[in-house]
Image (cartoon, coloured by chain):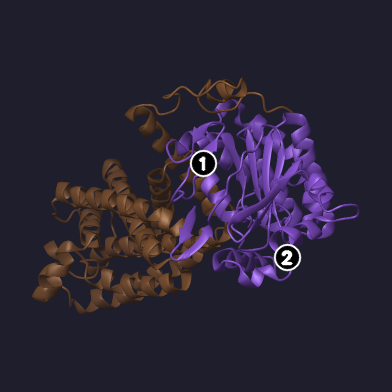
């Protein structure tokens, strides 16, 4: 059994093995190295998520039930009564589908704060934090892991929607765009959840908070109805709710409603960056309890 | 020095561990062992004083220090939803083991811990002793120069404890790595450590080889006697006065282990 050549940057372990002091910059690297490390950690944590989904697909199926009910019951009924004005006379079910897609990603992402507290309690988090992984890379990796799960769940929902007769775009570029929007949206809400985890610190508390915020986020977005039919105060909330931008971008890409795609993207990217920053800053606080 | 609110968990710890030795930090729950380890492993920053690993300041260069350390926390912490191989591969990736040699090194680490046959199974199906060995495989993938073990045998049955020690001894023989461990089992420290420090209420009370420490009390003395001599306390009594966090952690572990 040999562990001769360690994987990490050449020279650093060799230099200590011979008793020499470390050179000051043997591992600091430039911004390019930092970015490469960030990318590598994100890929690794997404890989872990894919392996877990492969081992146990139960959650994939059980989590498909609720969106299916929203589309099948709520969607069918409200399509029939024509109660909600849709742009260009698009059937309500088609209008609703991207909203339910975003909702499903939100519900998945909100779970990640609970997961990180569980990992803290189980000792997994401390072990991850003793690897050469910057706090921000750990958070970004987990955020995109939630994106991967949301994407796979999203494919299931798109199939259900298609079976119900919703005609979605077949343009591959738009589909890829929609996938990216879904991943970004999920990454942001995972960061929001991990930020709250860093403040709440206990799983039970976070479960309550998670329950308390998901429905208001959902109802104050344009997932179920256009913002213009909301009362003024709700419109104001909807304007600062990233879920609205996610839904509008998904709708624009998947069913061709008009939206300002660059604005949606800027809001989602900005919110995700802010979320990563906040959650990373709170991570040591979470881990040290 | 480290403080949780008004509770000073670690007050005065002045330790120098020699290269290649097996060093034990002994004391009851709440003595400050885990807090000391958390400072050493870059998880928390000391409020006063400094910590160095192989001459590198832990606060100034945490990323560098992490490349030198293999860490096994107190809780049994393998990911139950991944297989043995995947658990180790995760750490190979996090330590930037190149893709070319990754599979070979993962297999070697699992083999070294006697887990080759169970490698493809989910870690959730492992026994406590197997999970601990899997964690050792994870910690080894980086070829660490310092292996940090926080209560490595807590919650294991006597047979599993013996097996884990056997594997740790084999590793040291093969790689000559420095090992720092905490324990509250006096017999394990006595049998396995080159030197030990007795820790009590955030302070180091005595340091030396188990034989020397026992020798100061004369023929037939045990480490328990030594501990009582230096602290005026017994291990059974002390936990009641220990820090809340350490105790809470231990309880969590106990709960997880059923």
Check disc 2 and report the residue beneath it.
B235
> B249 or A77: which is nearer to us?
B249
Of the chain colours in the picture, the one used for chain B is purple
Chain containing the residue with disc 1 = B
Residue A51 in sight here:
no
Per the rendering, the mark at residue B116 is none
Pinpoint residue A209: horizontal percent, then vertical percent: 37, 72
Pinpoint residue A86: horizontal percent, then vertical percent: 15, 67
Occupied quadrant, residue B229: bottom right
Give me the C-alpha separation between circle 1 and circle 2: 27 Å
Of the chain colours in the picture, the one used for chain A is brown
**Sequence order check: which comes first, mark 1 or mark 2?**
1
Q: Crowding at label 1, few (<14), some or many (≥20) Cα neighbours within 10 Å?
A: many
Residue A44 in the figure: left or right of residue B246: left
Pinpoint residue B164: horizontal percent, then vertical percent: 78, 48
Residue A80 in the figure: left or right of residue B11: left
In the rendered view of the protein, which quadrant contains the C terminus of chain B? bottom right
Q: Secondary structure at mark 1?
A: loop
Residue A21 in the figure: left or right of residue A87: right
Check disc 1 and report the residue beneath it.
B51
Q: Is residue A210 above or below residue B200?
A: below
Asked if marks 1 and 2 touch (Cβ < 8 Å), the reply is no
Pinpoint residue A217: horizontal percent, then vertical percent: 27, 69
> A52 or B202: which is nearer to us?
B202
């Amino acid at each position: 059994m040999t562990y001769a050549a360690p994987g990490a940057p050449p020279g650093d372990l060799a230099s200590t093995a011979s008793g020499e002091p470390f050179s000051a910059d043997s591992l600091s690297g430039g911004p390019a190295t930092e970015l490469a490390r960030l990318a590598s950690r994100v890929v690794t944590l997404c890989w872990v998520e894919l392996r877990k989904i492969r081992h146990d697909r139960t959650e994939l199926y059980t989590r498909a039930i609720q969106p299916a009910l929203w589309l099948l019951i709520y969607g069918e009924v409200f399509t029939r009564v024509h109660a909600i004005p849709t742009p260009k006379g698009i059937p309500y079910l088609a209008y609703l589908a991207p909203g339910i897609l975003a909702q499903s990603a939100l519900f998945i992402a909100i779970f990640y704060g609970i997961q990180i507290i569980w990992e803290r309690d189980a000792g997994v988090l401390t072990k991850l934090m003793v690897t050469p992984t910057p706090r921000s890379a750990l958070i970004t990796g987990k955020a995109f892991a939630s994106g991967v799960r949301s994407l796979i769940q999203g494919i299931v929902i798109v199939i259900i929607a298609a079976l119900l007769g919703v005609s979605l775009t077949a343009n591959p570029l738009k589909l890829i765009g929609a996938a990216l929007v879904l991943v970004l949206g999920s990454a942001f809400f995972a960061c929001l959840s991990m930020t709250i985890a860093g403040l709440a610190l206990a799983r039970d508390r976070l479960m309550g908070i998670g329950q308390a915020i998901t429905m208001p986020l959902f109802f104050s977005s344009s997932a179920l109805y256009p913002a213009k039919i909301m009362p003024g105060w709700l419109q104001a909330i909807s304007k600062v709710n990233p879920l609205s931008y996610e839904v509008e971008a998904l709708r624009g890409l998947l069913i061709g409603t008009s939206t300002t795609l660059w604005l949606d993207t800027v809001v989602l990217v900005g919110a995700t960056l802010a979320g990563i920053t906040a959650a990373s800053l709170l991570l040591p606080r979470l881990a040290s309890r | 020095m480290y403080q949780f609110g008004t509770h000073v968990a670690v007050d005065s710890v002045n330790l120098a561990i020699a290269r290649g030795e097996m060093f034990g930090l002994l004391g009851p729950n709440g003595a400050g062992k885990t807090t000391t380890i958390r400072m050493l492993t870059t998880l928390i920053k000391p409020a006063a004083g400094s910590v160095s690993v192989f001459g590198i300041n832990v606060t100034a260069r945490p990323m560098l220090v992490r490349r030198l350390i293999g860490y096994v926390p107190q809780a049994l912490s393998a990911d139950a939803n991944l297989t043995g191989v995947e658990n180790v591969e995760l750490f190979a990736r996090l330590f930037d083991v190149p893709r070319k040699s990754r599979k070979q090194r993962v297999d070697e680490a699992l083999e070294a811990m006697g887990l080759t046959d169970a490698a493809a199974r989910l870690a959730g199906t492992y026994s406590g002793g197997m999970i601990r060995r899997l964690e050792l495989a994870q910690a080894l993938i980086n070829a660490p120069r310092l292996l940090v073990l926080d209560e490595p045998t807590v919650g294991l049955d006597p047979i599993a404890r013996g097996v884990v020690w056997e594997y740790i001894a084999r590793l040291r023989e093969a790689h000559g790595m420095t090992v720092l461990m905490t324990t509250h089992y006096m017999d394990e420290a006595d049998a396995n450590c080159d030197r030990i420090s007795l820790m009590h209420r955030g302070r180091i009370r005595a340091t030396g080889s188990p034989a020397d420490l026992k020798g100061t009390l004369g023929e037939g003395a045990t480490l328990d006697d030594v501990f009582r001599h230096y602290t005026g306390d017994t291990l059974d009594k002390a936990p009641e006065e220990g820090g809340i966090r350490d105790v809470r952690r231990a309880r969590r572990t106990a709960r997880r282990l059923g």
